[in-house]
Amino acid sequence: MVTGALSYGYANIALFYRKNDNLYADNLLHIGSGKKVNSPRENIPDYFYAGKINRESRDYTRIRQELREASSLMEVASNAGEIVFNSLNRMRTLVDLYYDPNATPEEKEGMKAEFESLKSQADFTLANARYDGELLIQDTGSGSLRSISIDPYDINVKFDISFSSHQVADVSSLALGSGDEASDAKAVQDQLDKAASYLAKVSAYSQGLRSNTNIITKKISVNTMVEDRLTGTDTGAELVKAVGRDIRSQSSLAMMAQANVMRGSVLKLFGI
C-alpha cells in the first residue's frame, strides 16, 4: 500500500513536470519568435485571424508596389508631356511672330527652321516616350496603359490609366508659312490644347496614385499593429513566466529524484 502511494505520487509529479516543461518550452518559443500565438492550440481565433491579416497585408504591400511603379511611369509621362507642350507653345508663338507685318524674310526663314526643329522634337518625344518598354503618349482606346487592382478581395476595383485620342497630340500635319495665319494658328492651338489635356490627365492620375498609395500604406500600418497585438509577445511577462516554470521544473526533478530514493528505501525495508 505504501509503495502504491509512492508510485501514485511519483506519477503525479512526473505529469506535473511534463505539463510544466511544455509550458516552459512555450515561453521560450514566444520569447525567441516574438509571437505569443504560434499555433492554433494556443489561441485558435487569434491564430487564424492573425493569419488572415498577414495575408491581407502582403496583398496590400504588392498593390502598393504596383502603385509606386505606376507613379514612376506617370513621372516619365509628365516629363515627356511637358516637352511636347513646351514645344507646341513655342510653335504657337512663332505663328504670331511669322505673320507679323514687321518680320523680315530672314527672320521668317529662321522662324520656319525653329518651327521645324520644335516639330521634330515633339514628334520624337511622342514616338519614343517609353517606360519599361511601354509607349506613354498614346491613344489607348478602350484599353489601359496600366490597370491596377487595388482591392485584394474584389478584382473589379481597379485604378485604370488610359488616354483617348483628343488627349494625345499629333504634330505631323503642322506647318508654318502656308499663307493663312488663322489656319496655321488653329492647327497648332488644337494640338497645344491636346497636349494640355494630356498633362492635366497625367497630373490627375499622379494625384490619384499618391492618394491610393497613402491609403494602402495606412491600411498596412493598421494591420501590422492589429497583428502585433494579437500575436506579439510581452517579453517581460514571458521571461517572468519562464523563470517561474524553470524553477518548478527543477523542483519537480528534485521531487522525482527524492521519490525514487524513498521508493527504493521502502522496497529494501520490505525486502522486495
Image (cartoon, rainbow, N blue to C red):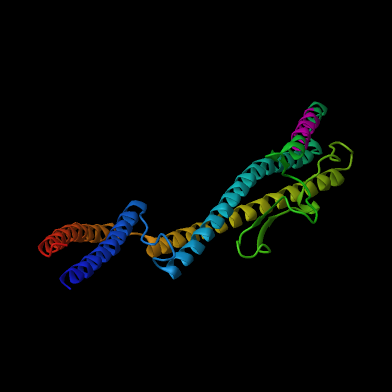
Q: Is residue 213 above or below residue 75?
A: below
Total numbered labels placed on residues in the image: 0
Image quarter of residue 113: top right
Is 62 in front, or is 28?
28
Q: Position of residue 41 (x, y in %)?
A: 41, 66
Q: Position of residue 4 (x, y in %)?
A: 20, 70
Q: Is residue 183 left or right of residue 9?
A: right
Q: Is residue 142 left or right of residue 235?
A: right
The residue lying at 63 percent from left, 52 percent from top is 203
Image quarter of residue 179: top right
Q: Position of residue 121 (x, y in %)?
A: 74, 34
Q: Position of residue 38 (x, y in %)?
A: 41, 59
Q: Is-magenta flag for residue 261? A: no
The residue lying at 21 percent from left, 65 percent from top is 10
Q: Residue furthest right?
A: 179
Q: Residue furthest top?
A: 106
Q: Residue furthest bottom?
A: 1
The residue lying at 42 percent from left, 64 percent from top is 226
- Placement of the N terminus among the 4 image quadrants: bottom left
Q: Is residue 63 above or below residue 78?
A: below
Is 64 in front, or is 167?
64
Residue 31 is at least partly visible in this image = yes
Is 1 in front, or is 196?
1
Q: Is-magenta flag for residue 120? A: yes
Query: Which contiguous range is marked in magenta?
Result: 110-123
Residue 83 is at least partly visible in this image = no
